[in-house]
Image (cartoon, rainbow, N blue to C red):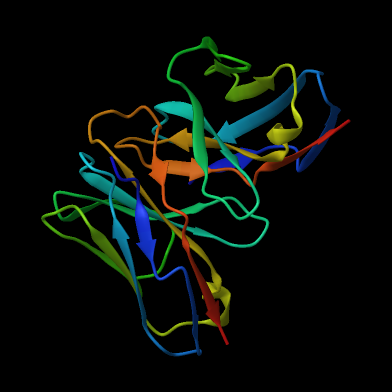
Amino acid sequence: GQSLEQPSEVTAVEGAIVQINCTYQTSGFYGLSWYQQHDGGAPTFLSYNGLDGLEETGRFSSFLSRSDSYGYLLLQELQMKDSASYFCAVITGANNLFFGTGTRLTVIP
Amino acid sequence: ETGVTQSPTHLIKTRGQQVTLRCSSQSGHNTVSWYQQALGQGPQFIFQYYREEENGRGNFPPRFSGLQFPNYSSELNVNALELDDSALYLCASAVSGGDTGELFFGEGSRLTVL
């Protein structure tokens, strides 16, 4: 089976940097993805790490360490619109994704 | 390019009934996955379809079944509904072989079981 752990809630100030950690246990690991979901909305893809290291996409970066079964999402220059839930998801093959329970990020002025 | 569309958006059923949810994949996508998302939780993988065959399944009982049609649209069927089946059901499409972890989700069908 799959098991993923994320902090349930994070609060950060507008303009700051926040890191959301994810640890996982799984078999058949292909990579780690991150999704954003606003209240009442659909999850939207943010990033994917198939190899160890850092991937950067604009204000968002994601990191993976396969040996530590650990990854994180880094959000820089936080904006109010970044308030949402963030999910890490392990890919076990054929784009079968298993999601964590999510981290609710609240950005305050 | 149209995105993933799901219907109905909301529905109410009673315990023991059956429900069918529908999904139209994004243009050019040939795999479709279904997820169940309870309130305050992450999406839980139900199954994936590719070439009209089930191509991966999560920890859901057989009363959850699906179909994929030649035009890549899909259905999720749930029999013998239980109260715990109340959730948002999300459909997601992708191009097979990518394994990039990038799925395109619809807005979901919110099912309430009374």
The one of A75 and A80 positioned closer to us in this rendering: A80
Q: Residue at x 64, y 23 (%)?
A: A72
Name above or below for residue A10 compared with residue B76: above
Q: Which residue is drawn at 47% across and 55% down?
A: B107
The image quadrant where one finds the C terminus of chain A is: top right
Indicate the position of residue B29 as horizontal and vertical percent values. 23, 41
The picture places residue A69, in percent across and down from the top left corner, at 57, 24
**Whether residue A16 can be seen here:** yes
Q: Between A35 and B41, which is closer to the camera in this rendering?
A: A35
The answer to which image quadrant residue A106 occupies is top right
Left or right position of A73 against B79: right
* Location of residue A14 with respect to A89 vertically, above or below: above
Most foreground residue, B51 or B2: B2
> Percent position (x, y) of residue A100?
59, 43
Task: Please name the residue shown 34% across and 45% down the image.
Answer: B3
Picture layout, residue B108 above or below residue A102: below
| Relative vertical location of residue A12 with respect to residue B49 in this rendering, above or below | above
Residue furthest to the left in view is: B70
**Tag count:** 0
The foreground one among A11 and A41 is: A41
Q: Image check: B110 left or right of B77?
A: right
The outermost residue toward the front is: B1
Percent of width and height locating residue B64: 36, 70
Q: Which residue is drawn at 52% across and 49% down?
A: A42
Identify the image quadrant of residue A82: top right
Asked if residue A64 lies left or right of residue B74, the reply is right
Using the rendered image of the protein, determine whether residue A26 is visible from the camera's viewpoint: no
